[in-house]
C-alpha cells in the first residue's frame, strides 16, 4: 500500500477537501476515490470526512491501495530499460529506441509498460511524458495517482536532435501544428492548427549534420520532427518528415535531461541520460 503523509500547516481550521486540493495538489478524482475507500483518508489515525476541518499539526494520511497494479498489462522481464532515478513516488527510465511506451495492437508485450509491470507489479502504469517508439531517452512513470497529477505540471524536458544541414546558432519556431487531413499519424504546419513553439541552440556540427539542444514551450505530437522539417532541417533518419536513413536507422531524437519537482518534498531533481551511440556516431 502506498501512503502519502501531510502534516497540516494551516494557521486557521480549514475543510479537508480545500486543504488537500489547494494546498497539497491532490486532484478531485483521487479525492473522490479515497473518500469512498475504507481507510482511504485518516487524520491522526482516525477516519475523516472531506467536509471535516483540519487543524495545524494534524497528520493526514492518504492510503492509495492499488493492489493488482495494471491488470491489463502483461509483465515482461526479458525487456530492459535502465533506471536513472527512482523513489517511492516515481521512476525515471532511459528508454531505448525501438521500445514503445504503451501497449498497442502491434506491440502488446514489448513496451516500457510491460517492463514497468514486471518491476512494479503493485503499481499502475502512469506515464508522465511520452516518447515516440524510436525516440530514445528519459521517461517518467508515476507510481501513484497523486504523483502523476503533480508531475504533469512540474516537469521540464530538454531534447537533443541531429538534423540535416547547418542550422543557425539559435532558432525560435512558432508555427501551429495540425493533423494531416488524410492521415491519423502525420502532422503538419497549418494555420488552423494548435499553437506550437520550439526553441533550439546548436551545440555541434559537421558538413552533414547539426546537433541541437531543444526546448519546447508546447507539447504537440511530433512537434520537434514537424518543426525541424518545416525549417528545412529534418531530423536524420526521420523518413516520415523528409530525413534520410542513410546514416542512422531511426529519427535522431533523444530526451536527455528532465528537471521536475519531487511530488512530496517539492525538491527540484534533475535526471540526465547520455546521448546514445547511434546519434554520437553522426558526429
Image: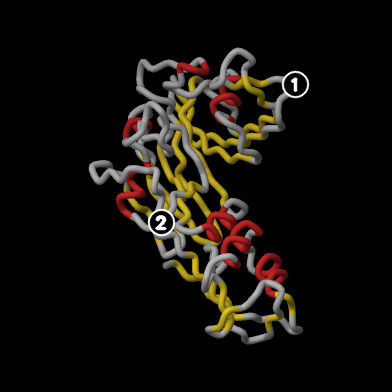
> For the point 42% across and 41% down, which residue is it?
137
Looking at the image, what colour scheme do you see? secondary structure
- The alpha-carbon separation of the residues under discs 1 and 2 comes to 42 Å
Mark 2: secondary structure: loop
Q: Earlier in the sequence, mark 1 or mark 2?
A: 2
Residue 234 drawn at (x, y percent) = 52, 21
Could you tell me residue 107's position as x and y percent?
A: 36, 31
Secondary structure state at the residue bearing disc 1:
loop
The N terminus sits in image quarter: bottom left
| Residue toward you, 90 or 270 | 90
Outermost residue toward the top in this view: 182
> Residue 116, which numbered label?
none
Residue in the picture at 35% in, 22% down: 249
- What residue does disc 2 label? 123
Residue located farthest toward the left when viewing the structure as drawn? 78
Read off the residue under disc 1.
191
Residue drawn at point x = 56 percent, y = 83 percent: 46
Bin the neighbour count of mark 2 within 10 Å (Cα to Cα): few under 14, some 14-19, many 20 and up.
many
Choose between 32 and 221: the one closer to the eye. 32
In percent of width and height, residue 256 lies at: 45, 44
Q: State which quarter of the image contains the C terminus.
A: top left
Residue at 57% x, 16% y is 183
Total residue callouts? 2
Amino acid at each position: 500500500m502506498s501512503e502519502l503523509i501531510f502534516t497540516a500547516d494551516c494557521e486557521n481550521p480549514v475543510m479537508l477537501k480545500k486543504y488537500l486540493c489547494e494546498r497539497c495538489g491532490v486532484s478531485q478524482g483521487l479525492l473522490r476515490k479515497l473518500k469512498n475507500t475504507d481507510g482511504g483518508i485518516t487524520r491522526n489515525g482516525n477516519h475523516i470526512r472531506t467536509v471535516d476541518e483540519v487543524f495545524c499539526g494534524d497528520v493526514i494520511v492518504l492510503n492509495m491501495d492499488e493492489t493488482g497494479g495494471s491488470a491489463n498489462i502483461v509483465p515482461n522481464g526479458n525487456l530492459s530499460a535502465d533506471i536513472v532515478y527512482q523513489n517511492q513516488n516515481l521512476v525515471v527510465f532511459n528508454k531505448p529506441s525501438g521500445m514503445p511506451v504503451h501497449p498497442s495492437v502491434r506491440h502488446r508485450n514489448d513496451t516500457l509498460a510491460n517492463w514497468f509491470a514486471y518491476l512494479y507489479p503493485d503499481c499502475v502504469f502512469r506515464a508522465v511524458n511520452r516518447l515516440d517508439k524510436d525516440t530514445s531517452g528519459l521517461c517518467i512513470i508515476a507510481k501513484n495517482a497523486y504523483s502523476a497529477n503533480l508531475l504533469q505540471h512540474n516537469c521540464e524536458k530538454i531534447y537533443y536532435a541531429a538534423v540535416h544541414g547547418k542550422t543557425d546558432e539559435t532558432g525560435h519556431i512558432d508555427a501551429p501544428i495540425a493533423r494531416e487531413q488524410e492521415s491519423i499519424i502525420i502532422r503538419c504546419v497549418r494555420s488552423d492548427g494548435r499553437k506550437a513553439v520550439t526553441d533550439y541552440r546548436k551545440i555541434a556540427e559537421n558538413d552533414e549534420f547539426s546537433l541541437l539542444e531543444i526546448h519546447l514551450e508546447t507539447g504537440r505530437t511530433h512537434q520537434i520532427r514537424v518543426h525541424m522539417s518545416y525549417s528545412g532541417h529534418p531530423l536524420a533518419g526521420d523518413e516520415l518528415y523528409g530525413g534520410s536513413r542513410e546514416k542512422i536507422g531511426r529519427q535522431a531524437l533523444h530526451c536527455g535531461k528532465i528537471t521536475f519537482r519531487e511530488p512530496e518534498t517539492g525538491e527540484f531533481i534533475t535526471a540526465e541520460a547520455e546521448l546514445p551511440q547511434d546519434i554520437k556516431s553522426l558526429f
